[in-house]
């Protein structure tokens, strides 16, 4: 499933249209700055050379816009090349306008920030080192800062060193921050896509009875024709030894096919309401059953129960989510997993407890986030706490449940996952099922 998602995921891909729009914004800003300094303030400035560099950036923008479509997504190496050009272009402008004494020198961080949000870490690090090298060169080699005619503004060395430190620090901090935020956003998007795939597959399975009914309806007429022709042939041939057995076999098999299709039709129509309802204890047993053969004892312990047993709509998302919690507990249990349940007039709840080592303190507050680190296995198979638990949490919360994770009071004696619904959300009234309405709160 994850391979399917990653195959379509534009990991580390920079959208060309975004890059073109950002460069047009930079071109407008650079042109405005040159015009204001050269003609508004009347400072001496190599206007021709500055506009030559700006024109080179504009030409690249026009070329990319004509060559590729707006939705084109650049390969990482192509994106790195374009951002490297931007870094050199900006460094050239700063060289002619004072180097690090120019207050716009902080813009050297921009290519690195853009790279951090869309390119792999190694390319971002390479671009970062290049920008730091250009910044260091600008601290030493540059033309004087444009100032009033006949005067030269000389900045002290300590100021230039301070600006260099500020630019380098900004590159490091903003680059790392942007990379982390973009990475978490990509992981979250992948996890949500995986959740949707799980739901689609479960819903396809749930829809098989409807497909069976449709197939039975479509095949009923031709099978009836075959049966009729077979009976006529059987009557016409009588006891002809050459064909009687074959014709009789043809008739009986066609009748068998019609009986099978009749059963499929009745399964979809007559049993739909019955199959749509599921008592809470049946849900627990269905959740636990697939995990009993892995060497871990699964114990079912009823808790406090007040009033009639809650009966809810059969929900593939809830079944998958609870099953994932039980699977996770089995993975990290040493000997046993205990499933306790309770209900009263207001709530319906389930508690899954394992006797493993518990959740490490550093990840306890992050449980349910996608692609988080693993906890040490206490027993059997030792899976991880990542995408599966995120999907389970998402599906259960969609059904209206509240989920809580934690460790038992005695350190190192196990962990628990608790799922609680409001009874009014979990229970589906009979009239809803009879009328064919679906509960929106439990619908995945």
Image: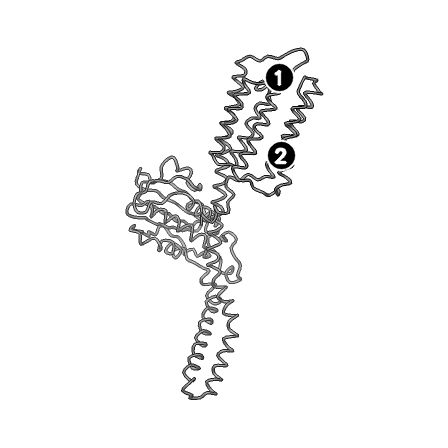
Residue 307's quadrant in the figure? bottom left
**Circle 2 SS class:** helix
| x, y percent for residue 117 | 52, 35
What residue sits 48% from the left and 42% below the top? 188
Percent position of residue 370, x then y? 44, 42
Q: Residue 145, labelled with which disc?
A: 1
Which mark is first along the chain, 2 or 1? 2
Viewer-closest of 163 and 56: 56
Rendered position, 379 above or below 28? below
In this rendering, position of residue 126 left or right of residue 379: right
Q: CA distance from mark 1 to mark 2?
A: 28 Å
- Tell me the mark number nearer the camera, choosing from 1 and 2: 2
Q: Which residue reaches farthest top?
A: 150
Side (left or right) of 417 relative to 397: left
Which of 340/118 is in front? Answer: 118
Could you tell me how many numbered marks the image carries? 2
Identify which residue, 214 or 336, lies in the foreground. 214
302 on left or right of 115: left
Please name the residue that numbered disc 2 is placed on.
Answer: 60
């Amino acid at each position: 499933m994850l391979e399917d998602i990653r195959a379509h995921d534009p990991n580390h891909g920079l959208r060309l249209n975004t890059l073109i729009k950002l460069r047009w914004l930079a071109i407008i800003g650079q042109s405005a700055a040159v015009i204001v300094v050269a003609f508004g303030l009347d400072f001496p400035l190599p206007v021709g050379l500055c506009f030559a560099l700006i024109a080179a950036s504009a030409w690249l923008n026009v070329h990319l816009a004509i060559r590729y479509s707006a939705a084109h997504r650049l390969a990482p190496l192509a994106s790195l090349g374009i951002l490297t050009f931007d870094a050199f272009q900006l460094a050239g402008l700063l060289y002619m306008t004072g180097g690090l004494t120019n207050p716009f020198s902080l813009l050297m961080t921009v290519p690195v920030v853009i790279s951090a949000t869309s390119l792999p870490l190694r390319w971002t690090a390479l671009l970062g080192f290049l920008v730091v090298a250009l910044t260091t060169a600008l601290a030493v080699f540059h033309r004087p800062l444009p100032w009033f005619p006949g005067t030269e503004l000389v900045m002290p060395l300590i100021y230039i060193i301070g600006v260099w430190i500020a630019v380098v620090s900004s590159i490091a901090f903003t680059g790392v921050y942007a990379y982390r935020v973009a990475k978490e956003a990509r992981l979250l998007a992948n996890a949500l896509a995986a959740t949707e795939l799980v739901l689609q597959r479960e819903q396809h399975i749930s829809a098989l009875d409807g497909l069976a009914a449709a197939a039975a309806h479509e095949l009923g007429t031709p099978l009836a024709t075959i049966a009729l022709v077979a009976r006529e042939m059987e009557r016409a041939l009588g006891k002809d030894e050459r064909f009687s057995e074959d014709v009789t076999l043809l008739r009986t098999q066609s009748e068998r096919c019609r009986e099978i299709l009749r059963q499929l039709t009745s399964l979809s129509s007559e049993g739909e309401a019955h199959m749509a309802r599921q008592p809470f204890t049946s849900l627990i047993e269905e959740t636990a059953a697939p995990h009993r053969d892995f060497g871990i004892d699964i114990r079912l312990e009823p808790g406090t129960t007040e009033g009639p047993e809650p009966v809810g709509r059969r929900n593939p998302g809830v079944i998958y989510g609870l099953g994932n919690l039980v699977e996770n507990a089995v993975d990290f249990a040493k000997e046993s997993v205990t499933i306790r349940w309770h209900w009263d007039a207001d709530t319906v709840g389930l508690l899954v407890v394992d006797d493993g080592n518990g959740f490490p303190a550093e990840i306890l507050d992050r449980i349910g986030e996608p692609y988080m680190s693993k906890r040490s296995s206490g027993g059997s198979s030792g899976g991880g706490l990542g995408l599966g638990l995120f999907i389970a949490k998402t599906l259960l919360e969609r059904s209206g449940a509240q989920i809580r994770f934690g460790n038992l009071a005695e350190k190192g004696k196990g962990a628990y996952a608790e799922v609680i619904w409001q009874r009014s959300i979990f229970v589906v009234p009979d009239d809803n099922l009879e009328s064919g309405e679906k509960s929106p709160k439990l619908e995945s």
